[in-house]
Image (cartoon, grey):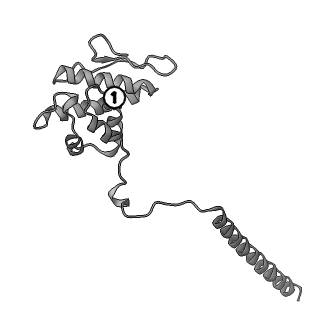
């Protein structure tokens, strides 16, 4: 829930339990930009059931706000969040994933940026160019099972033969 000024978020869990209070009012920057981010944060947060999730994501959103307002030229509204700016700012993969879900809900986001944030991201550099893992087919699993059964049978035969040799040696 948002207070009347649109800067205080009072999170409520799915079961209706109050999860504390978070404010964006202490941040320095354009009020409308801050209010749009707080609105998007409150809307996205309806699915979160933990006060710690709200705190962590709130800190991450504040980081984005501070970086945006300190950038050159400064981003002063949601409408100024472009694809170029988004890809340039220094956020890790988790931060970008969480914030893209919040930013997509912000009113006034350019359509091109929304589409870019909605699109699934590419694979990490270390895994690019490598084939994705593929599951075995049922026929391949049968071949693997039959090969494993043959190995087990051969092992049982060797153990039985060695046991017979040992029994003969003990009997003599």
Left/right of residue 16 with respect to residue 150 in the rendered view: left
Q: Which of 123/29 is in front? A: 123
Image coordinates of residue 162 in percent, x first then y, are 78, 82
Vertical arrangement, residue 138 with respect to residue 55, above or below: below
Q: Disc 1 marks which residue?
A: 105
Q: Quadrant of residue 42?
A: top left
The residue lying at 23 percent from left, 18 percent from top is 25
Image coordinates of residue 76 in percent, x first then y, are 16, 28
Q: Residue furthest front?
A: 111
Image coordinates of residue 122 in percent, x first then y, are 35, 52
User: In the picture, which quadrant includes the C terminus?
Assistant: bottom right
Q: Quadrant of residue 142?
A: bottom right
Left/right of residue 122 with respect to residue 62 in the rendered view: right
Vertical arrangement, residue 32 with respect to residue 103, above or below: above
Q: Residue furthest right?
A: 171
Q: In the rendered image, is residue 95 in sight? A: no
Vertical arrangement, residue 135 with respect to residue 147, above or below: above
User: In the picture, which quadrant includes the N terminus?
Assistant: top left
Image coordinates of residue 6 in percent, x first then y, are 28, 15
Q: Residue furthest top?
A: 4
The residue lying at 27 percent from left, 38 percent from top is 112
């Amino acid at each position: 829930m948002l207070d009347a000024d649109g800067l205080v978020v009072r999170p409520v869990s799915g079961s209706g339990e109050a999860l504390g209070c978070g404010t964006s009012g202490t941040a320095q920057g354009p009020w409308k930009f801050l209010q749009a981010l707080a609105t998007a944060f409150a809307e996205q947060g309806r699915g979160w059931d933990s006060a710690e999730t709200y705190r962590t994501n709130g800190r991450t959103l504040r980081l984005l706000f501070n970086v945006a307002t300190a950038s050159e030229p400064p981003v002063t509204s949601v409408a100024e969040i472009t694809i170029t700016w988004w890809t340039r700012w220094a956020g890790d993969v988790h931060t970008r994933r969480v914030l893209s879900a919040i930013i997509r809900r912000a009113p006034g986001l350019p359509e091109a940026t929304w589409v870019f944030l909605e699109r699934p991201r590419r694979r990490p550099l270390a895994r690019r160019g490598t084939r994705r893992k593929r599951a075995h087919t049922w026929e391949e699993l049968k071949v693997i099972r039959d090969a494993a059964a043959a190995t087990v049978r051969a092992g049982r035969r060797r153990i039985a033969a060695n046991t017979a040799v040992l029994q003969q040696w003990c009997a003599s």
